[in-house]
């Protein structure tokens, strides 16, 4: 029985993405991206705003993988964007159009390839 458990554990560890933990070293809500970097880091966004970006700097990927940005407004999922991560030092971002009536609490959940939350980035639109 123990041998079977070890075989199953080994098989799980060999699945793509397992054992190759990524780390989010920087994340920001920003009004723009310039030269693959955020131009600002916003906690509160004054209206009117047309579009925002969620910038993410990922390290530690030992093989091609992805992260997912899930944009929430007042607890409701508004967008889900899957982004490739293709090196051990990778910068990426997603964007979200913001309608005038969408003020209030926002969050972007940054998920790894196994849909595990690595970081939550909160911000307010007012």
Image (cartoon, rainbow, N blue to C red):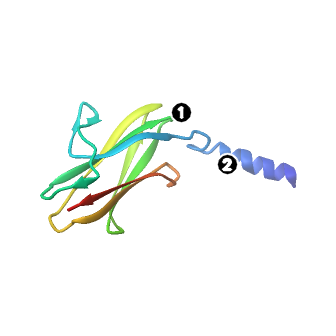
The residue positioned 74% from the left and 51% from the top of the image is 8
Residue at x 51%, y 34% (from the top left corner): 60
**Number of numbered tags placed on the structure image:** 2
Query: Disc 1 marks which residue?
Result: 62
Cα gap from disc 1 to disc 2, whole angstroms: 17 Å
Left or right: where does residue 60 sit relative to residue 46? right
Q: Residue furthest left?
A: 48
- Residue farthest right in this picture: 1
Q: Nearer the viewer, residue 94 or 47?
A: 47
Q: Residue at x 48, y 37 (%)?
A: 64
Quadrant (top left, top right, bottom left, bottom right) of the N terminus: bottom right
Q: Which secondary structure lies at badge 1?
A: loop
Question: What residue is at 36 percent from the left and 69 percent from the top?
Answer: 75
Q: Which residue in the structure is indicated by mark 2?
A: 12
Q: Residue 102 placed where, x, y %?
A: 21, 66
Disc 1 versus disc 2: nearer the observer:
1
Q: Nearer the viewer, residue 100 or 15?
A: 100
State the image quarter where residue 17 is shown: top right
What x and y, as percent, mark residue 71? 33, 58
Q: Say if residue 87 shows up in the picture.
A: no
Which class describes the residues within 10 Å of circle 2: few (<14), some (14-19), or many (20+)? Answer: few
Instruction: Specify the quadrant that holds the C terminus.
Output: bottom left
Q: Quadrant of residue 83?
A: top left
Side of 26 where 46 appears, left or right: left
Q: Is residue 32 visible?
A: yes
Across and down, in percent, residue 119 comes to 45, 51
């Amino acid at each position: 029985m123990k041998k079977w458990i070890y075989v199953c554990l080994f098989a799980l560890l060999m699945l793509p993405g397992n054992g190759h933990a990524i780390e989010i070293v920087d994340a920001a809500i920003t009004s723009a991206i310039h030269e693959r970097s955020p131009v600002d880091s916003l906690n509160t966004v004054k209206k009117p705003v047309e579009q925002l970006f969620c910038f993410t700097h990922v390290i530690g990927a030992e093989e091609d993988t992805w992260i997912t940005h899930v944009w929430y407004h007042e607890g409701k999922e508004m967008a889900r964007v899957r982004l490739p991560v293709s090196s051990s030092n990778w910068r990426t971002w997603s964007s979200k159009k913001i309608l005038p009536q969408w003020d209030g609490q926002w969050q972007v959940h940054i998920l790894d390839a196994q849909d595990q939350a690595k970081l939550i980035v909160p911000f307010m639109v007012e």
